Amino acid sequence: MRICFLKLGNVVAELDEALKTDIPIEGGHDHYVYSVVRELGNKADLLILSYSSKNDCAKRGNITAKTIKKAPSGGKSNFLECVSAIRLWMALQVELFAFRPDHVITGGFIGLLLPAFCYTTLFRKHLHVSFHNDLSKYSGFTRILRDYMMKRADSAIPHGPFLRGQVVAILGHSDNVYEYECRYTDMRSFTESSSFVDLTEKGRYKLIAYVGRIEADKGAFDLFEAAKGILRQYSDYRLVYAGSGGCFDQLKRAIESDGLADRVFLLGKLSRRDVACLLKKSWVVVLPTQSKISEGRSESALEALCLGVPIIAPRYGTFLDIVVDYENGLFYEPDNQLDLAGKLAEIHHDELHAKLVAGAANDPEKRIRSGIVNYGKTVLKTIEACDKQVGRIGKSVLRL
């Protein structure tokens, strides 16, 4: 059997990380390749395919990871954007035709879904569409096309109950919908780490924490811009970023340029133990993801709430299922730096903060779950169920 996992990201680096680590990766961005490799790597020939700023390839036994170079359009015109997209589609199509997988698992992004749909339709193979982000952000023809391909796929794999509800609403049924829900780390189980530096300086400072990839669309710069005035207004506030990403150096330069290097700290990628230490010391955790890539489920939010740490999040998507405004956290209007700054000022006050801490610590399992099963196991279950079926449920013979 041949399986292609078509996803975003640097899959070559992710494969190396998945194979070298001895510690299970149960959540976060690295969980997907790790869990697919662990569950499917010894059961099939596996191609993990993506696009990036350069061509790259790594082969490890029966597992191949490959990135296709996406030519930059420079944002000069819609025509050049279209040409770049067509070139990428053709390159991905060639890779699929050459590998000839029996099953293709891909995210719901059109740039990945379209070549996967074309290949599986032409060769009558199996298509499984995976969703990790809010489906309501598509509109117009793009949304119509995505929904059509979803309905023609063999199965849908949504992350958590929020996205499952969206998928079922689009399909009109729950047949062949396989929900997964990555386990977030129960940070309460970690003891103090000797390597962690207490940036509160024994309670002198209140930490505004960001945990995640340092990227513009994850809101890393939005948070910095919103916090600059607040940091100058409240001398006992500090802003702390935990994570790595493509914009790490750019954010570092912005911090230095504004003269805030003594108030804003970039810790880089931390161990889970050190992340737990940071969260336990934090006054508030901010999830400033921009609305264009809204979250389907937020691991950082779940981890913070289980420690009784309030969160500030945009009012949309999965956060609507996690945050109860003025009970366990605060909402701000999506993409609105001014409103986010206002919430940072508001939660600085001890009385409101104490109320939110009590709300966050008050039986969070009423709002969140600790995870059902990992992604790789769900994909394996989906493929096994598909292979047992005789014919394609809900599809025409010609798949037109």
Image: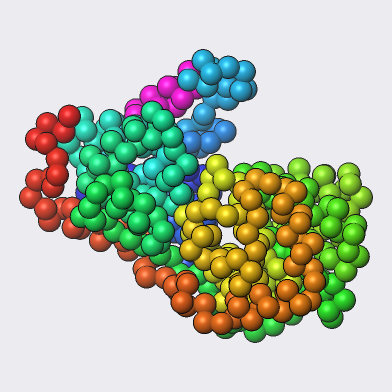
Predominant SS along the magenta part = helix
- Residue displayed at 48% across by 20% down: 82
- Is residue 156 shown above or below 207? above
- Image-based side of 129 in relation to 386, left or right: right
- Residue displayed at 51% across by 30% down: 69
Residue 354, position as x, y percentages in the image: 71, 79
Q: How many labels does the image show?
A: 0
- Image-based side of 59 in relation to 184, left or right: left
- Residue displayed at 17% across by 36% down: 124
Q: Is residue 87 magenta?
A: yes
Which image quadrant: the C terminus? Answer: top left
Residue 275, position as x, y percentages in the image: 65, 70
Choose between 13 and 129: the one closer to the eye.
Answer: 129
- Residue displayed at 65% across by 45% down: 335
- Residue 19 visible in the snapshot: no
Give the extent of the magenta segment.
83-94
- Image-based side of 370 in relation to 72, left or right: left
